[in-house]
Amino acid sequence: MYLRIWAYDVPPGAVGRFVAAYGADGDWARLFARAAGFAGTELFGGTEVGTRFLTVDRWRDEAAWAAFLERWGEDYRALDVALAPLTSRQELLLEGASP
């Protein structure tokens, strides 16, 4: 399994839209689902800081992720720009194969 784990800080007024866009059935998951090898997205929110979130995107392997980017990279970049106002900070924490 190939994982991409992101951390986000979300402005309080954007939390609802962020959850809708970044959740398991959100905009990102629908885009990723176009590609073979996508295994799902999970969204986690902290209980102490209600505006901090993690996403875990799962792919069959790194080749599946690379194939997605090759085919859908332009749409990926466009969605990233469109949804940028929903976060005040984002950071890729981990990208790689699970042990």
Image (tube, rainbow, N blue to C red):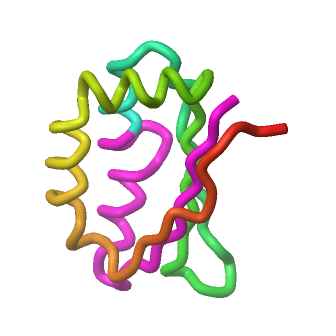
Instruction: Give the x, y percent position of residue 23.
Output: 46, 48
Look at 42% across and 59% down and name the residue there: 19
Look at 38% across and 18% down and name the residue there: 35
Q: Identify whether 93 is placed above or below 64.
A: below
Instruction: Give the x, y percent position of residue 26.
Output: 37, 42
Look at 49% across and 40% down and name the residue there: 24
Which residues fall within the magenta stretch? 1-28
Instruction: Give the x, y percent position of residue 95.
Output: 60, 50
- Left or right placement of residue 99 versus residue 72 in this view: right
Instruction: Give the x, y percent position of residue 87.
Output: 33, 74
Look at 37% across and 84% down and name the residue there: 12
Q: Identify whether 98 is placed above or below 52.
A: above
Q: Nearer the viewer, residue 35 or 64?
A: 64
Q: Nearer the viewer, residue 33 or 98?
A: 98
Res. 69 image quadrant: top left
Residue 4 is a magenta residue: yes
- Left or right placement of residue 70 versus residue 15 in this view: left
